[in-house]
Amino acid sequence: MTPTFKIDHTNCADCPIRHRAVCAHCDADELEELESIKYYRSFEAGQTVIWSGDQMNFVGSVVSGIASLTQTMEDGRTQMVGLLLPSDFVGRPGRESAPYDVQATTDVVMCCFRKKPFEELMNTTPHIAHRLLQMTLDELDAAREWMLVLGRKTAREKIASLLSIIARRDASINQKGGAIVFDLPLTREAMADYLGLTLETVSRQISALKKDEVILLEGKRHVTIPDMGRLMEEAGDDSDGGFLV
Amino acid sequence: MTPTFKIDHTNCADCPIRHRAVCAHCDADELEELESIKYYRSFEAGQTVIWSGDQMNFVGSVVSGIASLTQTMEDGRTQMVGLLLPSDFVGRPGRESAPYDVQATTDVVMCCFRKKPFEELMNTTPHIAHRLLQMTLDELDAAREWMLVLGRKTAREKIASLLSIIARRDASINQKGGAIVFDLPLTREAMADYLGLTLETVSRQISALKKDEVILLEGKRHVTIPDMGRLMEEAGDDSDGGFLV
DNA sequence: GCTTCCACTTGATCTCTATCAAAGCATCTG
DNA sequence: CAGATGCTTTGATAGAGATCAAGTGGAAGC
């Protein structure tokens, strides 16, 4: 399927997605090679992109929508171990099979590269390998930050942490008051799976944050954050966590 | 300080530590370059190798002992986000400062490489970059596996998970009965910090596993696992998790 | 317009783990 | 040997979040 927009690889400086990562230094030859092994795939909300253990014959990045990485125990307990927002990379160069399920949480468009040729390109192009290492290190840092959330934060702090992450990546700024506004891309259940909680607890804590005016809610998904600093405090983070407009 | 043993870089096939990773294909020139930027450092148990936020001017790997990566909140809550056993890599090529504290949990010897020259070597040597990416992906998988432990497992399952990880990496096999034997390299408090529990809960669950004969304890640290399959079940893992003698 | 369905909310109760407190037991020190 | 110190165990109690159970509200379908 063809996406409704065009990603301009000939001008990576303006490329809106981090997928420019693989062509960050805009070498024409490499670009051509990348173009030739590139294709797009669309997934509907709820669809599974790939099952844990399956052969994985592509790598790529999320263009639009949100995907998630989840692990499931035999008795059905599930834990989301990663949230893939637009520009995030998917796949493990050098690995045969997927280590966890990848699911489309909303409708998702992915930009994929066939794995074998991508790996070859990576092996012959230090810049791509280097960039990929940096992205993997970023993911590792994010995973470890999340370990602190899962292991030591209260339910209320967990919710605040999740909201601040989404705000950082996905929000727009209200022109009038400077408040931060976004739509929650996750169901309460998906949030619970990400936070190691039950959906009831998620619902209760969101209600509590709303009651205390840390957030404003219109409907069930539309969130306004009047004071980002306040939210960060609620999340247990002192710093602004690198949040910049 | 000089370690009491010699790591033979000229014969990587037999090299007991994964630190061979950086010279895995044994190109003589690279070896020489690595040798010239290599040095050893020793740390006593409890010593901090590097503080979160500090300038980090080396990368390296653990030769002996156990180090840990920890994150701490302002109110003192701490979460261990990684356990570094012998052969594990430390450091972030391309990053200025450390994202978390690195502490020596036991006495530790590290084999370090000066960061700048190591990075240059990495940039000019695809095999090293490639190997480093694979190691980082391994770490990422381990971190995400641990997210499931932190988010969804009970205290008893958490303890069993930790024991099985240590058993996998650090144990010897009892010749008589085929049981798995090791010494716990962590205090109850360190285990608690790794598992997102309190030290009292750790102690209680270890006592319970002992009472149920899932493990045998001599003293406080010496553990015997008569039936590894049983322990894996207690950990909530069905598979053998790749455990091989 | 009515029903159905799904995501969500709210309430009551239970349970697991944290918290507070005391004591055991090695090792080290003088 | 006595006392201190650090790690660990165990007990009593409290509390956060899970579980079980209705019930709400909006969107889709008939």
Image: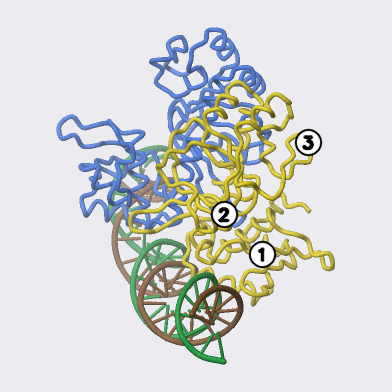
Chain colours: A yellow, B blue, C green, D brown
Tell me if I can see residue A189 in this picture. Answer: yes
Q: Residue D10 falls in which quadrant of the image? A: bottom left
Q: Which amino acid type is marked by label 3?
A: Asn
Q: Secondary structure at mark 2?
A: loop
Q: Which amino acid type is marked by label 1?
A: Asp
How far apart, in angstroms, are the residues tagged by discs 1 and 2?
33 Å
Q: Residue B180 falls in which quadrant of the image? A: top left
Q: Chain of mark 2?
A: B
Q: Which amino acid type is marked by label 2?
A: Gly
Q: Which residue is at the far right?
A: A176
Q: Chain of mark 1?
A: A
- Residue A183 is labelled as 1
Image check: A210 left or right of A198? right
Report the mark closest to the observer, 1 or 3.
3
Q: Chain of mark 3?
A: A
Residue B108: image location, x then y, percent: 47, 30
Residue named by callout 3: A11
